[in-house]
Amino acid sequence: MTKARLTSIGLGVAAAALALLAAFVITSLVLLAAGDPVGDVWGQLLAWPEMRNWANIINNASVLYLSALAVAVGFRMNLFNIGVDGQYRVAAFTAAVVAGEAWLPGYLNTALAIVCAMAVGAIWAGIAGLLRAARGVSEVISTIMLNFIATGLVAYLLRQVSVREEGSNEIGTREIPEGSRIGGIPFGDYEIYGFIVIAAIAGFAFWFVLNRTRFGFDLRATGRSTTAAVASGIDVRRMTVAALMISGAIAGLVGLPILFGDSYTYGSTFQSGLGFAGIAIALLGRNNPIGIAFGAVLFAYLDEQSNPLQILVGVSPDIVAITQGVIVLTVVISYELVRRYGVRLEQREVARVLASSRTDKPKEVSA
Amino acid sequence: MPTAAPPSAANAEVAVRLRGIGKRFPGVIANDDINIDVHRGTIHAIVGENGAGKSTLMKILYGVQPPDSGTIEINGEQVNLHSPADAIKAGVGMVFQHFMLADNLTVLENVVLGAERLHGIGAKARAEVMRISDAYGLGIQPDRLVEELGVGARQRVEILKVLYRGARIVILDEPTAVLVPQEVDELFGNLRGLKAEGLSVIFISHKLDEVLSVADEITVIRRGTTVQTVEPEGVTARQLAELMVGSELPSPSTEASTVTDQVLLRVRDLALPSDYASEGGRPLLDSVSFEIHRGEVLGIAGVEGNGQAELVESIMGMRPAATGLIELAGDDLSSRSTRQRREDGIGYIPEDRQRHGLLLDAPLWENRILGHQSRPPSVSHGLVDRRAARDDTQRIIREYDVRTPGPDVLARALSGGNQQKLIVGREMSGEPSLLIASHPTRGVDVGAQAAIWKHIKDARRNGLAVLLISADLDELIGLSDRIEVILRGRFVGSFDPAGVTPERLGSAMTGAGETA
């Protein structure tokens, strides 16, 4: 059945290409309508990045990758975890406090902080899971509300534990001691986050658990048909809580590459909004760990390449946000079109094979 | 080759003439070169197996789908029907198998709804409704709420709706599927009334005895094309069936009894409160008690919606509110989850295969795992063994004659009958001790039906206990060792299938024999 597999991979790539092409065209139309230099913008965006830019792209991509992975776990079960944003902020703050206090030496401290971050992320998402399982509250509503609560909570707690850096108005958690930081990996003359290794492990674990374990089968079965899952003996409520907690645990990792590889402290300027990009990337990558990796690099690439637009071409870098937003829409449309085409293709194939192998028997008609 | 209409009906005018109708769906030919003449003032039956293309043909005639080829003539004029509105304008009306009535409106309101322009909504409309009801003997009570009506009365409302809109050609899609035998007789009386007034009735069915008793002409469809048009006087049910299938007809009859003295399933005082119990809702199940022995098939007869689905789901552990004792081979199941009950040896063929039995967008081998996630061969130590799952799916495909190119095809791409065969094969895997089969052959072609019956019978010989729920009374009588009738959530009568007729079962199902 390698042929069928190739067909399905081919269709997947075609769908993504179609979506990107459509997004390219729509962005160009926006630029045209605004009277901006279309050619110059694309010239800048599509120019081959320098090594320094590549290091930034990879770093940013590893963060986005974790965020998209977290969203994808929910998607696989038809749960829409919009709350990755809040989950990673609560978790990163916790990790920063734990690592900053340095109760344990060296990398033990790092490991403890990572575990705490995942646990807090899981609990934060688990609240939404419990509400959904016990009271039927839509996780879309509860996770987005939990985002606001997370913002307020972290801001409040930050003031409680913060230390003010000298000569700065910024407040932040105690700096992580040098022995507990995660060193960079050399990349040409530059360095990329060492945390990228953990991101890659998370991607592999995601694939393995979902595709090779019974738990993953139960999760995907529930996502495809709740009614069939119940009849097959799956405890759907438990799966709902479990899936959201896993999603939250991965979300807990999102801020950590920055924390352990760059900022070493959680302050009021810690990067936000990473959770929402994750939703778009998970969609673009079809909830598949490899696809998500491509999506994360693409989004990071667009972000990085758009930085000098203002200076070089005189166009706001926000045009890239439009492109990214449009991608989400075109991806949803083109994947659905390709999915329907694939089903038709398969039905035709089934009919063809059956017609040629059993011409003597009556053909079934699914009218 | 389709034959022309027989001479006796030929002197009546042709109301509907279909010539060369063809319709293709992706991958399948639903209709191919259909030729039918329906004469005015006759009841014309169209028979064929499930999936032979009857429904598609009727959707074409009612304007729901356009044909890919062929012509439709109504009263001698060629018409193009692009929508049901066109069909109604041409005088064609359709009564669907699933009624389309608003429960909370009165009969009169339901009839007038959507046709307000014809006679308004007031006294004129009421007069017209009563005139039609009297003319055709429909016995309509215009001010009753539809929710108070029984199935037969609702069907008469549907027929009246069609007549009110001026139909002279009435299509009925499997109208008897939802009726008990007594109601069927009433319906046939009504249809003869329509015929006497010069209307044409197109009657779709696969129940041959009914067709023979009511139709003036019978057209047999097989594999999407018209095989032959015959008059009921000239044929027997058996000959018709052979025309439909193109070969010998199987029968569900069981052989010698294999019932043992070992009780496998014991149910005592099973009860399930209504979801609206606080508002005085009637319990969905009320002190249901029965036993099934090893090697025994217990059939449950009942009009749909009298607690069959709730009974099955309670035994499967899908209804947490159920109370009472359920024992499997002496073990109390009450604290066990659905999965544990499956592991204990219960196989489950659900009523709605697409909703409860399959992951439509997953390949067949993943569907093989569904419900068996905790058992070999597909899963061991919490890990999915893809190769073993594929191999075992191949086995099911072979043994149960599932027509598919292979185990990697999506379940959605298979026809309904093949989906059902896959489910039956899956649920028979792992040697269950109890099989709960809800409508195991519904929507399945005759060949597959025979295969499923054979598998159930073979397993029964090896000691399988079966709880069989079916709307097909012949299947129930043929397969069961004992039949219980369920009515409003209670068992109201026990029958020996050797000495019971569908009519007697029908009386019990509607409560006519309740006083006894």
Image (spheres, grey):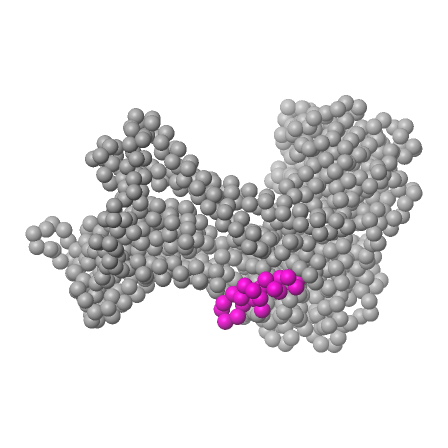
Q: Residue furthest front?
A: A188
Q: Give the magenta part as a residue range.
A: B377-396
User: Residue B104 appears in which quarter of the rendering?
Assistant: top right
Query: Where's residue B70, x and y in %?
Result: 74, 30
Q: Residue at x 49, y 54 (%)?
A: A223
Q: Residue at x 67, y 50 (%)?
A: A353
Q: Name the foreground residue: A356 vs A258.
A: A356
Q: Residue furthest left?
A: A167
Q: Residue at x 27, y 67 (%)?
A: A111
Q: Is residue A83 visible?
A: no
User: Number of numbered discs present?
Assistant: 0
User: Residue B314 appears in which quarter of the rendering?
Assistant: bottom right
In the picture provided, is B96 more to the left or to the right than A333? Answer: right
Query: Where's residue A115, x and y in %?
Result: 30, 65
Q: Name the foreground residue: A245 vs A204.
A: A204
Q: Is residue B379 magenta?
A: yes
Q: Residue at x 87, y 33 (%)?
A: B4
